[in-house]
């Protein structure tokens, strides 16, 4: 005799009820164990910025002519076919030396040794190695698209002697002409390219800290603008060389009168360091 179908639904309902009851009991037990949610404590109240001296007359012009925007055609240096790799990096440095004789020529020039050692660079874009023993002060150029237009820019460095500083420059190409879009001189401990930004790290007088400055391309100004200037802790315990007491950019600022189209010197915070 076949079993009666009348009892099967009843047994199924009973089993389902037991299963649901077990699951509910487990859920209630889980809420009270160590893996449950816990309070993080009271949340501090948000505070809006407090404006100081609201009656102070706002400044209408910068205190220092520092040349925040650097966009200048390098005279006499071209990039045939619009390819910046065809531009001579040594010629670019020589053009800058020629354009600013007060910095590089004469007994009182702060970087006269740089101009003297340019004779060791040869011609045709021969550049010095990254080591300090090389006679040529021009360092190896690096190429990367920093403007986002699909073409590479040239990041170039050269040593400013005898001050033992480093000049960092970025060039792009406009109508086969070499155009400088970023300029900075300092006691440099490292230079990095991160995405489309140029990051310069410099030692600080404060042990265990360094300055981190970042330049980012601005399509409206057609130049790399200083977008971040920070003082950060280092991981070397302050063993790096301290920044010189006199700002490296001061002599450069005194010998020039930067304008929006002229070569920029150090940012305000760097000059004040």
Image: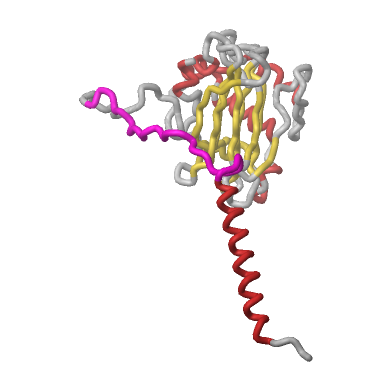
Q: How would you classify the magenta stretch by its main secondary structure?
A: loop
State whether residue 82 appears in this view.
yes
Asked if residue 256 lies left or right of residue 191, the reply is left
| Depth check, front residue: 256 or 267 | 267
Q: Residue 5 falls in which quadrant of the image?
A: bottom right
Name the residue nearer the viewer: 251 or 24. 24
Question: Which residue is pictured at 56% across the width and 20% down the height?
Answer: 101
Name the residue furthest bottom: 1
Image quarter of residue 144: top right
Colour convention: secondary structure
Give the residues in magenta.
Answer: 32-54
Left or right of 222 on screen, residue 44 = left
Q: Residue at x 59, y 8 (%)?
A: 107
Q: Nearer the viewer, residue 113 or 31?
A: 31
224 w.r.t. 97: above or below: below
Q: Residue at x 70, y 26 (%)?
A: 138
Query: Residue 206, image x and y in percent?
Result: 56, 12
Give yes or no for residue 49 being in the magenta stretch: yes
């Amino acid at each position: 005799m076949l079993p009666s179908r009348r009892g099967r639904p009843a047994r199924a309902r009973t089993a389902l009820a037991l299963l649901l009851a077990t699951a509910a009991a487990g859920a209630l037990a889980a809420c009270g164990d160590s893996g449950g949610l816990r309070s993080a404590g009271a949340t501090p109240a948000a505070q809006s910025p407090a404006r100081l001296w609201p009656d102070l007359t706002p400044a209408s012009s910068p205190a220092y002519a520092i040349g925040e925007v650097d966009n200048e055609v390098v005279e006499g240096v071209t990039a045939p076919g619009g390819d910046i790799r065809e531009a001579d990096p040594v010629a670019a440095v020589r053009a800058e030396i020629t354009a600013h004789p007060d910095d590089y020529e004469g007994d009182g020039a702060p970087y006269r040794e740089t101009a003297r050692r340019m004779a060791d660079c040869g011609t045709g874009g021969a550049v010095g190695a990254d080591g300090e023993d090389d006679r040529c002060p021009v360092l190896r150029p690096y190429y990367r698209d920093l403007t986002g237009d699909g073409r590479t820019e040239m990041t170039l460095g050269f040593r400013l002697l005898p001050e033992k500083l480093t000049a960092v420059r970025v060039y792009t190409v406009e109508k086969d002409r070499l155009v400088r879009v970023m300029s900075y001189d300092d006691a440099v401990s490292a230079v990095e390219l991160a995405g489309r930004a140029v990051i310069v790290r410099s030692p600080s007088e404060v042990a265990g800290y360094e300055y981190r400055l970042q330049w980012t391309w601005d399509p409206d100004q057609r130049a790399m603008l200083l977008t971040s200037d920070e003082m950060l802790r280092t991981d070397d315990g302050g063993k790096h060389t301290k920044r010189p007491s006199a700002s490296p950019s001061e002599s450069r600022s005194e010998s020039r009168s930067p304008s929006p189209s002229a070569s920029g010197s150090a940012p305000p915070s760097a000059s004040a360091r």
